[in-house]
Each structure stands twice: as C-alpha cells, then as structure tokens.
Amino acid sequence: MRIPGLFQYSLNPPALSGDDAAAAEEKIPWVLLERDAYVAKHDNATTAFALTCNGKPIQVTFCPRRPPSVSYACIHCPDPNEINTEPSIVATQEGFVLLRVAIGRKDEYLKNFDYYVYHAEGPSLMLLPRLPKHFDGRDAGVLCYGQEGYIVAALRHEGWWPDGQFDLCIYDSNKPGHWNVHRVSLSKRHGRKKHFFHIICQVVAIGGDAGTMAFADHWHGILFCDVLRVGDEAARRRPKEGEPMPLLRYVPVPEPHDSMLGDARLYRNVAVVGGRLKYVQLHPRKKPLDGICFYNDGSSTDGYIIEGWMATTWSRPAAATSASSSSSLSTSSSGDDDRWRKDTSIRDLNTGLKVPSNLGFELVSRRPWQPVLGLQDDAEDIVYFTAMVQRMDYKEWVAVAAVDMGKKELLGATAFSAAPRYIDFAYVHSTVSKYLR
C-alpha cells in the first residue's frame, strides 16, 4: 500500500529479532530512537491510544532495541489519509515522549500539527491543546516534575524582534487545557549582545528544583531557562504587555564554531550523563588547498581539504546550569568546575581507533556523522556515530558504531536499516525504554 506524502520505507518498520524481544523484557536503561515514527499498525504492551484533533482514533507503539541497534515507534490511524507526512519524535525525558503528527490534508499540514505526550507508565497518550503560536519541532522539549507531572516548553524567536528576546510557550500537565506564553530575554549579565544569533537544534531537560531546560544552538551556545520559576516571576513582576523578563542565561559551546558544515545536529550533541552536562563535537581536520576539492560522496570544499575527522567530548556540572546562576561563561578547559572541561579526544576516527580482531569489520575512511552521547552513567565515554562500515569481504554498509572515546576503541556496530529514510539527522537518545511495560 502507498500513502501519498509518505516514503514507502516509512510504512515498513524493521523486523524485530529474538534479541530485541529479550531487550524489551529487560527494560534496558536507554535507547537510540529513530527521529521519525513509522506509519504502521503494531501492537504490544507499550501501545497507547488517543483521538486526533479530527476525533479519529490514533495509537502509538514503541519497539525498544539494545544500542547500537536503533529503536523506533509506530503510529497508526485506521483512516490511511489521516497522516500525510512522517510523524516525528520531538523530545523525550524519562518516561515521557513528545510527538508531532501532521493530521488531515497535506497542503495544510503546517496548520494541522497535533502534539501528543506519551507516558510510558500506563501507558497513556495525551493530545495537547493547539499551540497559541507555531513553533518548529526543534524548539520544544519536555520536562518531568513532581510525581507524574510534565511541562512542555518551546522557545521561539521572530526575526523582527529585538536580539535576545524570545517567547517561551509552556504547557503544564498540572494546569491542563491551555498554554501560557511569556516574553523572556537574556540579561546583560548573562551574555546579552547587540547582535544575538541563536537557532535551536536540540532541547535538553536538566531538571532540579528550578526545572532548568537547555535550548542549544550547537554552532554558538546554549540558552538555559528555569521553567518552573517563570510563572512565579511573571506574577511577581506583572510586566507590561510585551515587556520581556530577563530569565535566560547564555553559555557559549566549545570551539570551533564551524557553522559552514550545515546542520549542527550531524556534528554535535548534548546530554546529561552522570550529573554532568556532556557535549560531543565532530569536526574536520583541515589542510589548506588552492582551489576546490571534490570528494567521492559528491561533497566539496573550497580552500582546504579534509584530512580526517576529530571527535572531542566536554562536560560541565549540570547543577551549575540554572539560569539564576551567576557563574562564569568561559569555555576554557581549565580546572574551574563551572567551565567546559575537555574529557576525551580522538584525532582521527578512521585511523585512531583500536579495532578488536573479532569484530570482523572496520570503519571506512569516509566522513562519520551524527555523534550521539550514550546515557549510561557507568559508561559515559561511549559515543555513537553513523558511519560506513566495511566487512572483511569488502562489502560496505551504513551502520551505527559504538566508540569508547576514553579507550579510543571501536566497540561494535549494527546495520542501520532505516538509513534510506534519512539524508540528515536520524535518531536521538532516550531513557523511555526503562519505563516501558
């Protein structure tokens, strides 16, 4: 069956193996989760049901797999014309997943995004009220708090607004039925500039008493906002209409800031692991060149040649990221515990890794992409990359490879069967698996 607007691959989720079934029973602590859900009917103990904005039934099911295999979700409506483009995983935290589904006519899909919150403990699926303002999926995150409460928060900026000002859209499950919108801004003390450029590409829930969330522009810096304090601050200040509240703190990301590479999610990632905010960056080692260099994958560079790809991890205390903190904004790698600390580095991912002989494959000397931090506290140096892998019979395939950055060792790789669905960012990390039934 074909559905207009959907890739054929999106209708056929990967087959689950016996090991996948065992992983689901074990409640694995975290997973890699495909960014786009499959449009297919699949039922198991994780299946949850709701109604669309049109009053039609919809269901969501999760299929967990051990990393480096990539887990996925299936979304199904009995009416095949109800979903007209690939549904997406917007954000996750603990047992909550924020999903976005385009409902109804394809030519009006920008007006018809349904946002749902899936709660693994139940499971349950909740359709959120329509947003007061349109935002891109990259702008939003979910924060769990209290016993079973959650907040969905999105930070958005219009090009004609003053630099450093944003609308913070908040939905609180303990105050259901509507969204609250607050105009917020950077304070001068926390990095406000005359020309402030910030395009959000990842949102991370840090938590704590203030409910801190990080809105990351991986080429420039991270905005921190204490979302649990916004309502109290708004009530205290009673700002005039449109007057922003200086509730954002800005921290630059470690250099280099190589925005010419394109989508930052293919080169950078951030997560809270072991009580620290960890950051991984993948960047090219460049050699000056007169003229243009063309590569086998169809890409090119002007004025330099890429000799290899270097990966570096950094971290800073997660507890020091609150927007009310007055700490340093430096990116120095010194011993100051509130600065980015350089943890690990591999000069060349293709030639600088130990590859155990029993693996039976090696990384191909091409560009790796999309580093994703593992979320296991006792294995915090493991990073996952999408890469070309070559077996001993010289056959090549796209795989997700696990690399121990501390030991500089390739731990393993699994074929990424969903690769034909993506030309860019493909999966996220999530702890929802340990809450699934």
Image (spheres, rainbow, N blue to C red):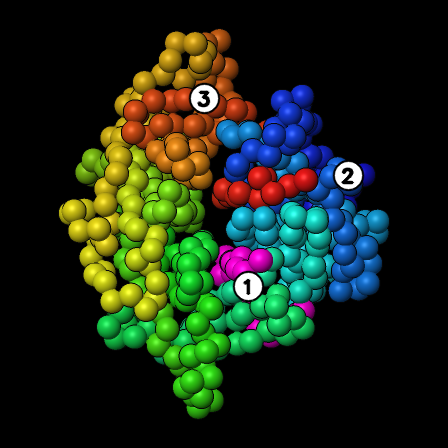
Which residue: 55% across, 63% down? Answer: 151
Secondary element at image label 2 = loop
The residue wearing badge 3 is 412
**Are the residues tagged 3 and 2 within 8 Å (C-beta)?**
no
- Tell me the residue at 38%/57% (across/down): 217
Q: Badge 1: few (under 14), some or many (20 or more) residues near its Cα, within 10 Å?
A: many
Q: Are marks 1 and 3 in contact (CB under 8 Å)?
A: no
- Nearer the camera: disc 3 or disc 2: 2
Q: How crowded is mark 3: few (under 14 residues within 10 Å), some or many (20 or more)?
A: many
> From the viewer's perspective, is the residue at label 1 or at label 2 nearer?
1
Residue 34 as seen in the image, left or right of residue 252: right
Query: At 29% from the left edge and 65% from the top edge, which residue is drawn?
Result: 325
Residue 344 tag number: none
**Mark 1 — residue?**
151
The amino acid beneath tag 2 is Asp
The numbered mark, 1 or 2, whose residue comes first in the sequence reads 2
Drawn side of residue 118 relative to residue 375, left or right: right
What's the distance in space between the residues labelled 1 and 2, CA to CA?
28 Å
* Residue 422 or residue 147, whichever sits in front: 147
**Residue 367 in picture, x, y percent from top left:** 38, 32
Quadrant in the rendering for residue 164: bottom left
Q: Mark 2 points at which residue?
A: 43
Q: Quadrant of residue 112?
A: bottom right
> Is 112 situated above or below 119?
below
* Residue kind at label 3, given as amino acid type: Gly
Quick check: is 110 in the magenta stretch?
no
Image quarter of residue 115? bottom right
The CA distance from mark 3 to mark 2 is 30 Å
How far across and down, in percent of the image, does residue 384 sit? 43, 33
In the picture as drawn, the residue positioned furthest to the front comes out as: 147
